[in-house]
Image (spheres, grey):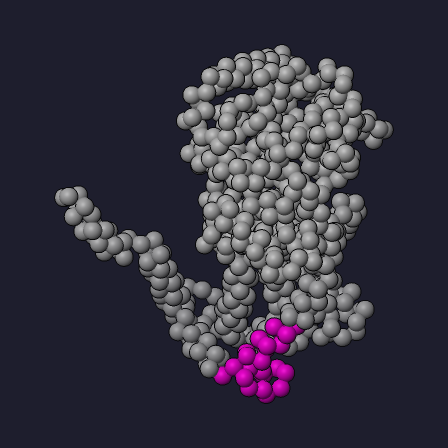
Amino acid sequence: MRLAPVNSVASLDQPSASSQLSVRHVTKVFPGKKGLFNKLSGKTSRDFVAVENISLDIEPNTFVTIIGPSGCGKSTLLNMIAGLSPISGGEILLNGVPITGPGPDRGMVFQNYALMPWMTVEENLRFAVETVDPKTSPKKRDRILKEHIQLVGLTGAERKHPHELSGGMRQRVGIARALAINPQILLMDEPFGALDALTRGFLQDEIERIWEQQRKTVIMITHSIEEALLLSDRIVMMTRGPAARIDEILEVPFPRPRNRETIEQHPAYHALKAEMESHLFRETRAVEAARVGG
Amino acid sequence: MAVTNATPGLVTNERQESLLQNENVQAFGLFMLSLGLFLLFWEVGARAGWFVKGVPTASETLKEFWWWVTNPFYNNGPNDLGIGWNLLISLRRVAIGYILASLVAVPLGILIGISPVAYKAFNPYVQLLKPVSPLAWLPLGLYLLRDSEKTGVFIIFISSIWPTLINTAFGVASVDKDYLDVANTLGASRLRTIVKVIIPAALPNIVSGLRISMGIAWLVIVAAEMLLGTGLGYFIWNEWNNLSIANILVAIFIIGLVGLLLDSLFAALEKFVAFGRNS
């Protein structure tokens, strides 16, 4: 159930052959303001090390959740995997090939949905599909759109614009768009962070249902312990930033398909939950203390 | 059960009340009342000699107004032209200058907005030229073009280019980073990102810029035409020389009305491209 902290495992220098995504000694430094011009205007600042020496191997068809105190570099790590943010040190391999930039092999779900307001639900999906493969025949394309709109339960809302939809429905479109390009890995950056508690619970159930159908590799960032326990196979717990590391990786042994009532009956549930709570509590308290002290 | 029975009655009651209590109805009532009082004050004041000598009464002015709008298109030479012709002349100048300005300002604004370096490099020009009064360009226009018609168009062009340019560049430069990230993760080409994402995302800003430019163009044409001959501005100047205050008032009202119509057109367009966004 418990693994040793990955950072200290020397054998990780060679990624395991079965891993789909391999994060190897990755460091992210946001350069500070330097140089003569900034020195003259007194605006120099020091480099900021967001994450330091992170290593992580993700097997195919696993649902991985990254959890940690706010400002710990979770989003930075995800953006590096997405290719949106350059890597300062180390490398990230996808099927053994280093990631150099964004690409359609990774589908991204954004916290604020990031739907184009001027496009209808269908047009948002079509934009994604046509961008990734302009040569898709109209017939095949329409079938893909229809399938994915159906998958997230939005049939009938195809011609609506995002501002006519609720937050939960918008994020369904976001998920459908990310899946419509048939990525190898789905990246989700706090996908339910902007939703109210009821909608969030409902969408979590939906994600569980969709995941059972497709079993794509998912990397999701979250703040919610219950969400992580309901959805993931592995939970990556990160320490506070700056220079955030992976503290511990938990294996979640609950059988699938899951639902929130039955997993609470599982003998391991409460131990895992307590473990995560104490970790998050400890890290968050340290963050607050550092803020007061600094 | 009693509650459900009572509810429909309550609703109809509210509806009957709301007709008199409706904000729009109230506003319209207040508008009509103030207008009536104003016209009354004007009429009485002009008759009683409260104002300077020669101020026409409200009824005279309305009569003139009616005459001008019922005889818009007659032509007795350049100094006695129906107001419809003058209006069309002004609109034509505005249209040519404004469309030319937009054709320059929108593409240039997009180019400037896309590149942060270009944005910073060209900003000083824009900031320096934007606050210059359009009429300051008039002598320069006359000297360069040696033609009053072209000078009018030139002044409209030079004064209506800035708001569109600034708003377009701003809109393009401040496109939500999430939209760009979406395009990036999908591997969209630069051209596709610009055409499918950046321009539609900036469209509300572009249209706002076009709206402000149109307002300015309409403001400027009247002033410019006073010095050029023909058009609504010249009409006012000509009636001033005739000392026909009533006709000046008629022209002012028509200029305001046309400006209002043009602005509403762009307001509708803004709404059309907003898709739930505010600006």
**Most extreme residue toward the bottom, as rendered?**
B76
Where is residue A293, by image quadrant? top right
Residue A58: quadrant of the picture:
top right
Q: Residue B182 magenta-drawn?
A: no
Residue B92 belongs to the span the image colors magenta:
yes
Residue B209 seen in render = no
Image side of residue A211 versus residue B49, left or right: right
The residue depicted at 65 percent of the width and 38 percent of the height is A185
**Is A279 rendered above or below residue A184?**
above
Residue B26 position, x and y percent, is 32, 56
Above or below: residue A261 compared with residue B245: above
Q: Nearer the viewer, residue B105 or B83?
A: B105
Please state the horizontal and vertical placement of residue B262, each as a whole percent of the image: 55, 66
Residue found at x 55% / y 23%: A252
Residue segment shown in magenta: B71-93
Q: Locate residue A63, reporting x and y percent.
A: 59, 31
Is residue A270 found left or right of A56 in the rendered image? left
Give the residue drawn at x 54%, y 37%: A211
Query: Can residue A176 be seen at all in this image of the molecule?
Result: yes
- Of A287 and B263, the residue lying toward us: A287
Query: Which residue: 56% across, 42% down?
Result: A175
